[in-house]
C-alpha cells in the first residue's frame, strides 16, 4: 500500500478523515482506469446505456498490515453474482465489484459446492463429463455473449472497498445508473495508524514495544476496533447524488428487519432498501422505498426455486422502478 494521497480537501467529517488517514490501495489507479475505459465504451453506443454497479461478497478487516489475521464478513457472493446475470439479461451494463474469489456471474454455477469439486466436471480423458455438459455449454455461451457488457473488479479489505466505491461512484454519477450494494460491509475496522506492521506476537519477548497493547497481561489478544464511517450518506448526498441507490439490510432477528431497514431509509434518504434475513435470504426479501411507505415482499416456494432464483424477481422489480424513476424526473 502507498501512503495516503487524498483527493479530499476538507477534513471535517469522519468520512473525510477516513480517506486522509487510510491509504489508497495500490490497485486503485488501475481500477479507475478500467472503469473509465468501460464507461467510455458505454457512452460510445447510441442509446443511453443503463449501468449498474453491483457490489458483492464480504469485506475483510486486517489485524496486521502484513496480513496474517483478519476479521471477515459473511457473504458467498450469490446475491451479487446472480443479480449481475439478471441485470445483463435486462440489457444493463454491469460493473461487478466483488470480493476476490467470491462467486462470479455465470461461473457461480460451478463454484464452491461441497459435493462437486473442479475435477469432477471432467471425465478421465479430460473431456467435460456428460452430466455437466449442457449447463457448462450454456453458461459459457452466456459468459461470452455478455463479456463486453461486464466489468469485473475486485476488493479484499473494507479499505479497498471504500476507496473503490468512492472512485467508481464519482465516475458513474448519473440517472441511468443504479448502485446495487449487496456486499456485506464491515461495521468495525482497525484504522491504519493503529495497525501493527507485522504479525502480532503472542509471546511478549517478541512483541514490538509500541504495539504491546494488543496483548494484555493475561496473554489475551485485545481488539480495539473503530466504527466504519457511514459512507452511504456521502454516496447518496455527494458522490452519486444523481443515481438510484439501493442498499441491502441484513439481519438475523426477524423482529428487527423492518425497523432497521426503515431506519436506513430515513437516515440516508436513498431510493430503496432491500431487507433480508440470513436464514431465508435465498427465498424471501422485502423491498422498502423512500416514496411509498409500502413493503413489497418477494417470496418463493420450493417448487418455484427449482425453476428460477429469487434474484430474477428482485431485479425485475428494481429495473421497473428504475425506469419509472428516470421517467418521473424527466
Ligand atoms: C446482503 O444483505 C446480501 O443480500 C447478503 C447476500 C450478504 C445476505 P450471499 O452473498 O448473501 O448471497 O451469501 N448484503 C448487505 C449486507 C450489509 O452489510 N448491509 C449493511 C447492514 O446490514 C448495510 S451496507 O447494515
Image (cartoon, grey):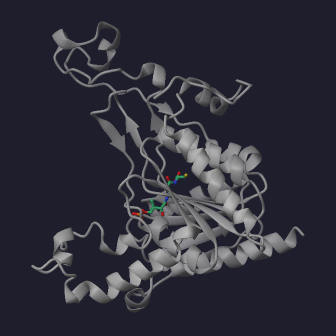
Residue 262 visible within the image? no
Judged left or right of residue 142, residue 8 is right
Quadrant hosting residue 20: top right
Residue 150 visible within the image? yes
Quadrant hosting residue 139: bottom left
Q: Nearer the viewer, residue 189 or 275?
A: 189
Q: Nearer the viewer, residue 199 or 286?
A: 199
Q: Position of residue 298 (x, y in %)?
A: 55, 79
Question: The C terminus lies in which quarter of the figure?
Answer: bottom right
Q: Position of residue 80 (x, y in %)?
A: 48, 65
Question: The N terminus lies in which quarter of the figure?
Answer: top left
Quadrant hosting residue 172: bottom right
Residue in the picture at 64% in, 44% down: 167
Residue in the picture at 51% in, 78% down: 145
Judged left or right of residue 291, residue 65 is left
Residue in the picture at 54% in, 32% down: 24
Q: Does 25 sit above or below residue 185?
A: above
Q: Position of residue 250 (x, y in %)?
A: 48, 58
Q: Does 79 sit above or below residue 167?
A: below
Judged left or right of residue 307, residue 217 is left
Q: Position of residue 166 (x, y in %)?
A: 63, 43
Q: Does 8 sit above or below residue 266?
A: above
Amino acid at each position: 500500500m502507498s501512503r495516503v494521497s487524498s483527493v479530499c480537501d476538507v477534513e471535517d467529517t469522519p468520512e473525510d478523515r477516513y480517506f486522509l488517514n487510510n491509504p489508497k490501495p495500490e490497485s486503485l489507479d488501475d481500477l479507475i482506469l478500467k472503469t473509465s475505459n468501460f464507461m467510455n465504451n458505454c457512452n460510445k453506443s447510441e442509446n443511453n446505456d443503463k449501468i449498474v454497479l453491483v457490489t458483492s461478497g464480504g469485506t475483510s478487516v486486517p489485524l496486521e498490515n502484513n496480513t496474517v489475521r483478519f476479521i471477515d464478513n459473511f457473504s458467498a457472493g450469490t446475491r451479487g453474482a446472480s443479480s449481475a446475470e439478471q441485470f445483463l439479461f435486462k440489457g444493463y451494463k454491469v460493473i461487478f465489484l466483488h470480493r476476490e474469489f467470491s462467486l462470479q456471474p455465470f461461473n457461480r454455477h460451478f463454484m464452491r459446492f461441497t459435493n462437486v469439486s473442479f475435477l469432477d466436471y471432467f471425465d478421465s480423458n479430460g473431456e467435460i463429463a456428460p452430466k455437466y455438459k449442457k449447463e457448462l455449454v450454456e453458461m459459457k455461451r452466456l459468459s461470452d455473449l455478455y463479456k463486453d457488457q461486464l466489468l469485473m473488479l475486485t476488493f479484499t479489505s473494507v479499505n479497498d472497498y471504500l476507496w473503490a466505491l468512492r472512485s467508481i461512484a464519482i465516475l458513474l454519477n448519473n440517472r441511468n445508473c443504479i448502485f446495487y450494494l449487496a456486499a456485506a460491509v464491515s461495521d468495525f475496522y482497525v484504522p491504519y495508524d493503529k495497525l501493527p506492521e507485522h504479525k502480532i506476537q503472542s509471546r511478549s519477548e517478541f512483541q514490538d514495544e509500541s504495539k504491546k497493547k494488543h496483548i494484555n497481561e493475561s496473554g489475551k489478544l485485545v481488539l480495539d476496533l473503530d466504527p466504519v464511517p457511514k459512507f452511504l450518506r456521502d454516496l447518496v448526498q455527494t458522490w452519486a447524488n444523481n443515481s438510484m441507490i439501493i442498499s441491502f439490510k441484513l439481519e438475523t432477528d426477524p423482529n428487527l428487519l423492518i425497523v432497521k431497514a426503515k431506519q436506513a431509509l430515513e437516515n440516508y434518504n436513498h431510493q430503496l432498501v432491500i431487507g433480508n434475513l440470513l436464514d431465508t435470504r435465498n427465498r424471501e426479501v422485502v423491498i422498502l422505498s423512500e416514496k411509498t411507505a409500502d413493503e413489497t415482499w418477494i417470496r418463493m416456494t420450493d417448487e418455484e426455486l427449482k425453476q428460477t432464483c429469487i434474484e430474477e424477481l428482485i431485479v425485475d422489480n428494481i429495473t421497473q422502478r428504475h425506469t419509472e424513476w428516470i421517467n418521473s424526473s424527466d
